[in-house]
């Protein structure tokens, strides 16, 4: 949600958003967030279920957190007063503060990397309401089979383009947690991610953490699992297009169109070609992963070569690029 009321026309079941400023970061650089007043916020929250992204992964030292405790509580009460349904939390310190001082629901952020049954149990015991799983979990179907054992709702982000097992992920979010005044990550680590993405292209794209709209049927059996679409800082037209694609379970354009983290420079290559993967060229890719159920963490490149075979096919058939339009 970028605070444009037109976004509500998407028909999404619920939304998540944040605003510039505040004592706690929101996993986005502050200058990428809109400036919006209380009247606009209440206008939106009165019409839709909206979560506030309070998902900073770092709050400083323990001494600093204790010093700021009363301010955190006031901040949470303001969020509740503005009509938000709940908060998305990426630091466990805030969980009891939310529970003891507000009636807000709690969604565990993907930043906390819930990728195992044991981690689910920990947060279940803490009494949270929703758990947004680690961005790589959507291909771990053995773990998804276990979700029915828990009463919580689970969420996975369908359109993230983050590289698989990203080595910069934790440091990136820690940096963004302190980006309350100006953008500190305009180049780091995006340039490093770009270099990995284009290396052996499109192999690392296939390994990345996305699900095509056409593949959502593979998750229908998981009744307490829902999808989330990333892109709260994107323009309204982009958000409407992305939501429509996933609601319709169909998108025949470029896979990169649906990934908010794919910046313009990533789409450009040397010469007359740009990175372009027609979603239709991936028919059967994720279904094969579900049927064979490899362990992506340990089998990749040895016991499992699915991504390697599909990458070779895309290269050899010319389906990984297209000629740039003048």
Image: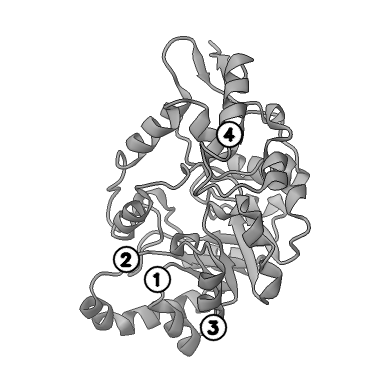
Write down the residue under mark 2. Answer: 58
At numbered mark 3, what does the secondary structure look like: helix, strand or loop?
helix
Displayed quadrant of residue 151 = bottom right
Q: Residue furthest front?
A: 303
Write down the residue under mark 4. Answer: 307
**Earlier-in-chain disc, 1 versus 2:** 2
Residue visible at 53% across and 48% down in the picture: 231
Choose mark 3 or mark 2, whichever is in front: 3
* Pointer 1 with pointer 2, Cβ within 8 A: yes
**Earlier-in-chain disc, 3 versus 4:** 3
Choose mark 3 or mark 4, whichever is in front: 4
Gap between marks 4 and 2 measured at Cα: 34 Å
**Earlier-in-chain disc, 3 versus 1:** 1
Q: Tell me which colouring the rendered structure shows.
A: one colour
Residue visible at 57% across and 26% down in the picture: 311
Position in image of residue 47 (x %, y %): 67, 66
Position in image of residue 119 (x %, y %): 51, 71
**Earlier-in-chain disc, 1 versus 4:** 1
Write down the residue under mark 1. Answer: 91
Q: Quadrant of the N terminus?
A: bottom right
**Earlier-in-chain disc, 4 versus 2:** 2
Position in image of residue 91 (x %, y %): 39, 71
Residue visible at 33% across and 60% down in the picture: 177
At numbered mark 2, what does the secondary structure look like: helix, strand or loop?
loop
Choose mark 1 or mark 4, whichever is in front: 4
At numbered mark 1, what does the secondary structure look like: helix, strand or loop?
loop
Displayed quadrant of residue 72 = bottom left
Q: Is residue 186 above or below residue 131?
A: above
Position in image of residue 212 (x %, y %): 67, 40
- Nearest the viewer among 120 and 62 is 120
Disc 4 packing (10 Å; few <14; some 14–19; many ≥20)? many
Write down the residue under mark 3. Answer: 125
């Amino acid at each position: 949600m970028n605070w444009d009321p037109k976004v509500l026309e998407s028909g999404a079941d619920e939304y998540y958003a944040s605003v510039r400023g505040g004592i706690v970061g929101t996993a986005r650089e502050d200058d990428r967030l809109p400036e919006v007043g209380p009247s606009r916020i209440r206008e939106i929250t009165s019409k839709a279920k909206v979560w506030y992204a309070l998902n900073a992964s770092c709050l400083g030292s323990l001494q600093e957190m204790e010093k700021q405790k009363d301010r955190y509580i006031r901040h949470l009460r303001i969020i509740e007063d503005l009509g938000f349904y709940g908060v998305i939390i990426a630091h466990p310190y805030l969980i009891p503060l939310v529970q003891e001082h507000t009636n807000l629901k709690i969604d565990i952020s993907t930043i906390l990397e819930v990728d195992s049954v044991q981690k689910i149990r920990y947060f279940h015991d803490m009494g949270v309401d929703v758990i947004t799983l680690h961005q790589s979990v959507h291909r771990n179907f053995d773990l998804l089979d276990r979700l029915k054992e828990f009463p919580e709702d689970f969420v996975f982000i369908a359109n993230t383009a983050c590289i698989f097992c990203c080595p910069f992920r934790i440091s990136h979010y820690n940096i963004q947690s302190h980006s309350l005044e100006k953008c500190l990550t305009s180049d780091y680590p995006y340039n490093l991610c770009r270099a990995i993405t284009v290396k052996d292209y499109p192999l690392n794209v296939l390994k990345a953490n996305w699900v095509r709209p056409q593949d959502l049927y593979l998750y229908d059996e998981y009744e307490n699992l829902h999808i989330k679409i990333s892109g709260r800082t994107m323009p309204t037209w982009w958000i409407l297009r992305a939501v429509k694609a996933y609601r319709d379970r169909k998108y025949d354009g470029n896979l990169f169109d649906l990934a908010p983290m794919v910046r313009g420079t990533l789409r450009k290559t040397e010469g007359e070609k740009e990175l372009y993967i027609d979603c239709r060229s991936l028919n059967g890719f994720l279904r094969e992963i579900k049927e064979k159920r490899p362990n992506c963490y340990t089998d990749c490149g040895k016991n499992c070569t699915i991504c390697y075979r599909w990458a070779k096919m895309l290269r050899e058939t010319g389906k990984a690029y297209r000629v740039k339009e003048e």
